[in-house]
């Protein structure tokens, strides 16, 4: 039986990054991956590359260009007529990007001598794994041994009985990445990250989008002021966001879907051409053999781990969406690196306090650290500095004046406790905030840092000055 220092199960951003880092550190490493694409071919990259982060951003970019050309170009004196969208071309561009990136990972595996084992892995013990593979003409079962096992089996969309996915008219996030035409009326269940991003894609392309959200507050985990700004702007863009609207049932014929939901005024009905179910994701441990080998799961199905991603089984670790913490690709990858380094005897480190969050609507929403509400709840005294993009030259020049940067700093020590952005390119701007917090920086550090002019980052600088009431441009 072949034996490795490390076997990683799953090749999403948690698993493939862990495998590469293990191999870089001189450990003999294999990565087992069961993903099969629509064309029947195996692929690396997991949810993130195949049906998550990357394809959704490809469609967000395409739809952003379309919308910009159609609605904003004239303001720049650019007259474009007859703008149309070729949905099939947009979808095949997305598929090409996915293919290049997933093939890139197989190149990285070759370069680093990571063995890609194609098939489904089941834990037999804390040192033995069974792999079931499908070939054209036969199925195969093999077994391998490992000194260390890293589980990175990710997550899958949550299903709700009131809206069962048929992947024709009622789709999950994967189905919503491959519509072959723009639905005239689109319903989305769930105003979370995925619902808002996919709703935005199709709204920009012309769909009438209604988003039904069971909770009464919009983006309840986001700083309230930022969420309120975002809600106002997204509604202005045409997203019909209905809060406190709990979906109770759906029915579809071959043409349209009727959605029943309840809000504070009682029972409601909505008819749409397509419905996206985006009510969250759940950890994926299907067929992993957790029960048989005594791997502990919590009541929601997550693999139980300590702060170093160690499970209850010796030498078995788990990272990414299948364990507690935010379901984000970069969180999965950093856990993967930290674990690889600990296995190699190095001090692997993961700072859960400084994980950035991004929602890729336009403008984008990004934050790191605590919100104003969380600070209040924890009884921490803080000062706030904020600055609207409207007052920066670059945002004006770009015609992107919506949004603001908000910095929360400890009242006594001035240490930055949270930075929240709603604005153009917030996904890029948040990096400065993360670095500041990672270095335990103060708002004064940011205020004394020279920011290039004219840039969007000047809003960060001015917000930092604002903590001490000394903004210049407002
Ligand atoms: P996954 O990426 O889910 O990978 C797990 C892999 O394990 C899969 O390839 C699966 O086939 C394999 N596997 C499972 N069980 C077995 C087994 N028993 N044997 C062999 N292989 C197995 N996150 C962001 O940070 N930014 C974004 O912009 C973003 N956008 C998203 C958009 C959408 C539409 C979706 C759905 C998700 C998005 N996410 C985003 C979330 C992100 O995709 C996940 O957080 C990330 O993929 C988690 O990585 P992972 O390695 O834990 O698991
Ligand atoms: P996220 O977990 O960020 O992907 O968001 C999923 C969203 O879906 C959450 O805000 C949930 O409140 C919402 N949701 C879950 N079930 C329902 C339902 N039956 N009707 C409407 N919204 C729902």
Image: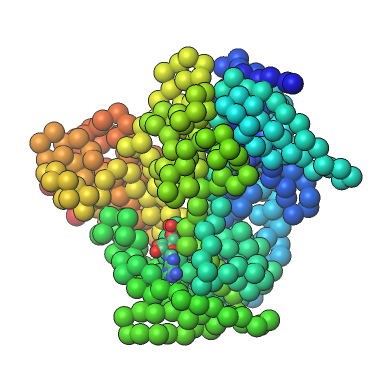
Residue at x 47% of width, y 20% of height: 342
Relative to 248, say whether 114 is above or below: above
Q: Nearer the viewer, residue 432 or 69?
A: 432
Q: Nearer the viewer, residue 20 or 433?
A: 20
**Along the horizontal axis of the image, is 131 left or right of 58?**
right
Q: Nearer the viewer, residue 52 or 229?
A: 52
Query: What is the x, y in percent for residue 48?
Result: 57, 46
Question: Image quadrant of residue 115?
Answer: top right
Relative to 441, say whether 262 is above or below: below
Query: What is the x, y in percent for residue 344?
Result: 52, 16
Question: Image quadrant of residue 411?
Answer: top left
Query: What is the x, y in percent for residue 273?
Result: 60, 79
Residue at x 52% of width, y 35% of height: 294
The quadrant in which the C terminus is found is: bottom left
The quadrant in which the N terminus is found is: top right
Question: Image quadrant of residue 56?
Answer: bottom right
Residue at x 80% of width, y 43% of height: 134
């Amino acid at each position: 039986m072949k034996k490795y220092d490390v076997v990683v199960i799953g090749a999403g951003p948690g698993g493939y990054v862990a495998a590469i880092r293990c191999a870089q550190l001189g450990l003999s490493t294999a990565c087992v991956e069961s993903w099969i694409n629509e064309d029947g071919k195996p692929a690396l990259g997991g949810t993130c590359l195949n049906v998550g982060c990357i394809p959704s951003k490809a469609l967000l970019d395409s739809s952003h260009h379309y919308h910009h050309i159609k609605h904003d170009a004239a303001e720049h004196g650019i007259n474009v007529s007859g703008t149309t969208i070729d949905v099939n071309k947009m979808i095949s561009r997305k598929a090409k990007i996915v293919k290049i990136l997933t093939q890139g990972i197989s190149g990285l595996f070759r370069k680093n001598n990571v063995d890609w084992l194609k098939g489904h892995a089941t834990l037999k013990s804390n040192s033995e794994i069974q792999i079931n593979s499908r070939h054209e003409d036969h199925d195969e079962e093999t077994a391998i041994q490992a000194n260390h096992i890293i589980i990175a089996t990710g997550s899958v969309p949550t299903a709700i009985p009131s809206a069962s996915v048929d992947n024709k008219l009622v789709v999950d996030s994967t189905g919503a990445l491959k519509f072959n035409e723009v639905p005239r009326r689109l319903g989305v269940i769930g105003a979370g990250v995925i619902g808002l991003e996919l709703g935005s894609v199709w709204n920009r392309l012309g769909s009438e989008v209604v988003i039904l959200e069971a909770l009464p507050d919009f983006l309840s985990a986001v700083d309230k002021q930022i969420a309120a700004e975002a809600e106002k702007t997204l509604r202005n863009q045409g997203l019909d966001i209905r809060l406190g609207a709990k979906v109770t049932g759906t029915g579809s014929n071959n043409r349209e879907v009727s959605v029943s939901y309840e809000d504070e005024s009682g029972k409601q009905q909505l008819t749409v051409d397509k419905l996206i179910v985006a009510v969250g994701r759940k950890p994926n441990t299907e067929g992993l053999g957790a029960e048989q080998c005594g791997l502990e799961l919590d009541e929601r199905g997550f693999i139980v781990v300590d702060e170093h991603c160690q499970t209850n089984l010796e030498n078995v670790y788990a990272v990414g969406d299948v364990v507690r913490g935010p379901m984000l690709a970069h969180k999965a990858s950093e856990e993967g690196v930290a674990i690889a380094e600990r296995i190699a005897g190095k001090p692997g480190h993961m700072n859960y306090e400084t994980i950035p969050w991004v929602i890729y609507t336009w403008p984008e929403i990004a934050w790191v650290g605590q919100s104003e509400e969380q600070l209040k709840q924890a009884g921490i005294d803080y000062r706030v500095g904020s600055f609207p993009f409207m007052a920066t030259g670059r945002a004006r020049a770009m015609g992107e004046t919506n949004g603001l940067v908000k910095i929360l700093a400890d009242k006594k020590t001035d240490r930055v406790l949270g930075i929240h952005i709603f604005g153009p390119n917030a996904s890029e701007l948040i990096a400065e905030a993360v670095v500041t917090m990672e270095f335990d920086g103060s708002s004064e550090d940011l205020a004394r840092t020279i920011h290039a002019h004219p840039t969007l980052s000047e809003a960060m600088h001015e917000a930092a000055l604002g903590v001490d009431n000394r903004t210049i441009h407002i």
